[in-house]
Amino acid sequence: MPREERRRQLLETAATVIRTEGTDALTLARLAEQAGVTKPIAYEHFGTRAGLLIALYRHFDEQQSEAVHAALAETARTLDDAVAIVAAAYVDCVLQAGPEYGAIAAALSASEEMSDVRQTLREGYVDLYQAALARFVLDPAAVSRPLLLGLIAAADGLSEAAAAERMSRDEAVDALSRIMLGALRD
């Protein structure tokens, strides 16, 4: 199997292990066993358990970024369109990732390496959202990094609430859209 295809298979298997058995059950040895490969293959791809968890986290992030890019390019004609796309993509990514997304973040929360990864990913979202939203506001400078970081924090909270079934997906998307529009129209 080609290297990238094997990596994708290993990441999907790891997500299944987390979903069915929890993050504590996920080790490189367990991953290799479940994927039907030898341990050295799992170690070659990820190096450590933390490396595997970070790769999973990045995998979910890449899916979200791809969805946002595609939707924005296809249908964003107004600020309302762009905000609706960004809000829905953010919430949907967390929901599609399932409980393993939160479990992965929690498992790595004490890791300095994970903190760096999360910061890098957040900065990527700030850049993406700044480019996507600035073209629809009168003063593009108003779409500042601090504002976008705050909106991303709101997106995290609402997405996690929807994933925990404390609110519906539609409620989370609507609330996030309203927060974003309110902040961007001031």
Image: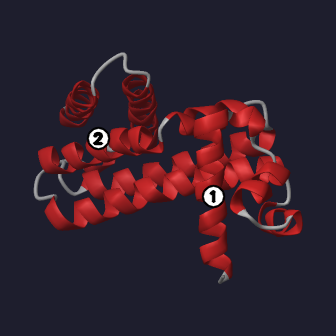
Residue 87 is marked as: 2
Q: Residue 80's quadrant in the figure?
A: top left
Q: Residue 26's quadrant in the figure?
A: top right
56 above or below 157?
A: below
Return the residue at label 1. 11
* Residue 183 left/right relative to 60: left
Residue at image position (22%, 34%) is: 177
| Between 29 and 119, the one nearer to me in the picture | 29
Residue 121 appears in the picture as rendered: yes
Q: Quadrant of the N terminus?
A: bottom right
* Residue 22 left/right relative to 144: right
- The amino acid type, in three-letter code, at marker 2 is Ala
Element class at badge 1? helix
1 above or below 63?
A: below
- The amino acid type, in three-letter code, at marker 1 is Leu
| Between 21 and 77, the one nearer to me in the picture | 21
